[in-house]
Image (cartoon, rainbow, N blue to C red):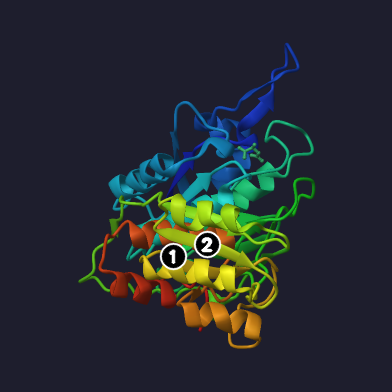
Amino acid sequence: MKRSTILIIYTGGTIGMKTDEATGALVPFDFSGIYEEFPSLKRLNVDIEVFTITPPIDSSNVAVENWVYMARIIRDNYARYDGFVILHGTDTMSYSAAALSFMLENLAKPVIFTGSQIPIGILRTDGRENLITAIEIAGARNEDGNPIVPEVALYFQNRLFRGNRTTKHSAEALNAFASFNYQPLADVGVNIQYNSAVIAPYAPDFSDEFRISENLSDDVVVVKLFPGIRPATLRAMLIDSGARGVVLETYGAGNAPTSQWFVDLVKEAVDRGVVVVNVSQCKDGAVQMHLYETGLALQEAGVVSGHVMTVEAAVAKLMYVLGKNLPLSETLDLMRRPLRGEFTL
Ligand code: ASP
């Protein structure tokens, strides 16, 4: 089978650091010298090229314009490469992977995010394995020559996840990411075991060309409920902020206070055209607003169920959908159904 060509896009983060032999300080690793650093890469059936974003950024500084830049790099190189690996800091990688999953429309090639908890130039690094396996996955094709993972995914510590289903759940462990409500797309041991039943099918409709959506709305707020939240605080976030979209982090299966002031405020926001999406503070399990009176009140107020969506995915999806500036009914329709497998109905 013909060799796959992979573009590595290095954006920054811990993975890109190594120890300076002379000073002992952490300095940036030059990924363009990847073959000299990891000669064993030549044994993979892939040809690699590297695009380095300068200056590299700590992912806590990632903003919407960085996502647009990443999406443009992929668009401009889409025809030349079979797959893409995005090296990214771990702190906001789940947000970026979710954002790109929406922005890359009609994607039919692998876009694999990865990074590391320990710099690549440190002996005990987790970055080497993450990088090499991410490259292998980005280049993997089935007998028909089609990519095995034609979607945005995140590879970390032996597991490949759907990009818009992940959360960074540990600042310490090497398995820093989890996907609480969706099975891994692949488990990596001696072999890479692809779980084809949960991977997006390779079904590119060639009448729908790959394109990127560059318009993201940042008129979004995340409101995390806690017992004792004051009416004025909630009003400031739901109404006075001027937000067009709200990710409401509720309790359990999507529950919230039934006090009149609370329900009235949420209803006021919805009636003003604010899109309020209900996601749970629990990592595992779905929002089911019909289960309890405390959830039903939100449903009746017009709040949209986020189902099992992560906060990261809900923020990214709201930014993407609101960025299309559609009439409210169409916006709500897009929010209510899965667009890239971010939840399953
Ligand atoms: N602060 C770093 C970043 O997210 C942490 C990391 O890469 O692991 O860019």
Q: Are the two marked residues, 2 and 1, in contact with CB atoms closer than 8 angstroms? A: no
Quadrant housing the N terminus: bottom left
Q: What element carries label 1?
A: helix
Report, in whole angstroms, how far the alpha carbon at label 2 lies from the one at label 1.
12 Å
In-image side of 271 versus 60 (left or right): left
Where is mark 2, residue-wise? 247
First-in-chain label (2 vs 1): 2
* Amino acid found under the numbered disc labelled 2: Val
Q: Is residue 101 above or below residue 308?
A: above
Question: Residue 330: percent from the left, percent from the top?
Answer: 29, 73
Residue nearer the viewer, 269 or 12? 269
Taking the spot 30% from the left edge, 55% from the top edge, the residue there is 212
Where is mark 1, residue-wise? 269
* Amino acid found under the numbered disc labelled 1: Ala
Residue nearer the viewer, 135 or 310? 310
The quarter of the rendering in which ligand 1 is drawn is top right
Dot 1 alpha-carbon crowd within 10 angstroms: few under 14, some 14 to 19, many 20 or more: many
